[in-house]
Amino acid sequence: MIQIPSDLNPDLVPLAWLLGTWEGAGVTDFPGSPKANFGQEVTFTHDGRDFLEYHSRTWVLDAEGNKTAPLESESGFWRVSAEGDKGPRKIEVVMVRQDGVVEVWYGELADQKPQIDLATDAVARTAASGPYSGGKRLYGYVKGDLMWVGEKQTPEVPLRPYMSAQLKKVVSPEEVAEMARNLGDLPDDGIAFFK
């Protein structure tokens, strides 16, 4: 269920489905890097201003699902800008990664569904970063999960998928307590609740 916090900036309501902490796993595969399964934790938070703050950490997983090494970290800010009263909603993202890459992304919210298509508009790199010239991402809210796929390109490799993941929303102890306070009366047998 998507909840809209009462203190969320009204401009961000179309992004409310992203809010929270998400955890899960995915796969990465790009020429020049080993193919691997990875774990991921993503957080989207807000403080009442007109942006969402974004943080992502990924780590390589072994065959048993144990963390073996850090993979990528990125942080950024997501904004919505409207085009006219009924036009498509545009998304702007500024992101920085641990490897010395800073990106400006632009994209659109899909019509009538929680999905975002993004593409890089500008890329800046430090001398220490590896080759990278741009990318695309698709984020979607599918049956309660946050799913995403990323594509990237370098001067040597044309645009191609390189990472994707399926993430589940993490519920804090405070959120569990709030749910319990708001349950109301449940049937004694528990089964009638699902009928």
Image (cartoon, rainbow, N blue to C red):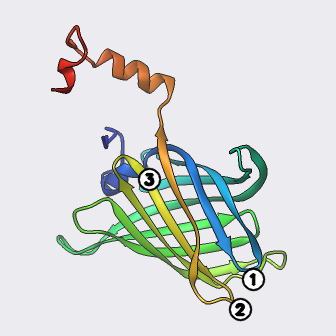
Q: Secondary structure at mark 1?
A: loop
Residue that carries the numbered disc 2 in the rendered image: 156
Report the Cα–Cα distance between label 3 and label 1: 28 Å
Residue 52 image offset from top left, x and y in percent: 47, 54
Q: Residue furthest front?
A: 63
Q: The disc labelled 3 sits on which kind of residue?
A: Leu
Q: Residue 131, labelled with which disc?
A: 1
Q: The disc labelled 2 sits on which kind of residue?
A: Glu
Residue that carries the numbered disc 3 in the rendered image: 146
Quadrant including the C terminus = top left
Quadrant including the N terminus = top left
Q: The disc labelled 1 sits on which kind of residue?
A: Pro
Label whose residue precedes the other's in the sequence (2 or 1)? 1
* Labels 2 & 1 near each other (Cβ < 8 A): yes
Q: Residue at x 55, y 54 (%)?
A: 54
Front-lying residue, 116 or 54: 116
Depth-wise, is mark 3 or mark 1 nearer the camera?
A: 3
Front-lying residue, 170 or 15: 170
Label whose residue precedes the other's in the sequence (3 or 1)? 1
Report the Cα–Cα distance between label 2 and label 3: 31 Å
Q: Residue at x 78, y 78 (%)?
A: 130
